[in-house]
Image (cartoon, rainbow, N blue to C red):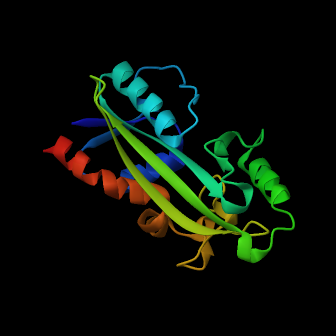
Amino acid sequence: MRLLVATRNRGKLREVLARVQGLEVVSLDDVRPMAEVEETEDTLEGNARLKALAGAQGAGLWTVADDSGLFVDALGGAPGVRSARYAPGTDADRIEALLRAMDGVPDAERGAAFRCVLALSSPEGEVRFARGECRGTILHTPRGTGGFGYDPVFLVHELGRTMAELSLEEKGRISHRARALDALQPMLRALAA
């Protein structure tokens, strides 16, 4: 059975491929062209649902889509659901904007969480959800060259390193997406059976 992962983001796709077994996984680049889904909802669940439904109905395949965000305590949860659109430009531009917004915030108040919601949709429109979270701290300067997004400034407490300093295997065990994929496993096993 084929499972569409509704993304063109190679980093996200690698994380999913490392966790999904028993299904042939394809991305948006592997199916007929589809329009990009605009993330118009104000929750991770809403945006993940939009993308999963569009992929499932457009490709006729069971589809998993995610919406993820960085929720910073000192910023009232920002950038949150708008993490990818927090500032125009590149990941480095968004990190710079985040660090400017946190200028002067003491270390003890720099707590944050990466959150992920996965939506799994059938071609007929049935949608199920799985969630994952990873807590950490926002550093004052980026560290590491791996990962993507805000990974270089997100210190994972339990490992003492940023997400960008972790191997794909390490990140695949503790990231918000990995934890959401773990929660999704029973649903995926049922599809593979």
Residue 113 seen in the current view: yes
Q: Position of residue 72 (x, y in %)?
A: 67, 59
Q: Say which residue appears at 37% left-offset and 53% top-offset.
A: 181
- Picture quadrant where residue 42 is located: top right
Pinpoint residue 113: horizontal percent, then vertical percent.
58, 61
* Place of residue 88 in the rendered image (x, y in percent of width and height, measured from the top left): 78, 38
* Position of 177 relative to 134 (above/below): above
State the image coordinates of residue 161 (x, y, percent, origin top left): 61, 75
Q: Can residue 7 be seen in this view?
A: no
Q: 89 above or below 125?
A: below
- Camera-nearest residue between 114 and 143: 114
Q: Quadrant of residue 39?
A: top right
Q: Going 75% across and 49% down the picture, which residue do you hit?
A: 94
Q: In this view, does 151 lie above or below 36?
A: below
Give me the residue at 73% from left, 56% from top.
Answer: 75
Residue found farthest to the front: 76
What residue lies at 26% left-to-right and 22% top-to-bottom? 124
Which of the pair 78/192 is nearer the observer? Answer: 78
Q: Is residue 100 above or below residue 143?
A: above
Q: Nearer the viewer, residue 152 or 167?
A: 152
Q: Is residue 146 left or right of residue 158?
A: right
Q: Quadrant of the C terminus?
A: top left
Q: Residue furthest left?
A: 193
Q: Residue 36: name its quadrant.
A: top right
Q: Viewed as shown, does residue 49 lie left or right of 160? A: left
Q: How many marks?
A: 0
Q: Which image quarter is the N terminus in?
A: top left
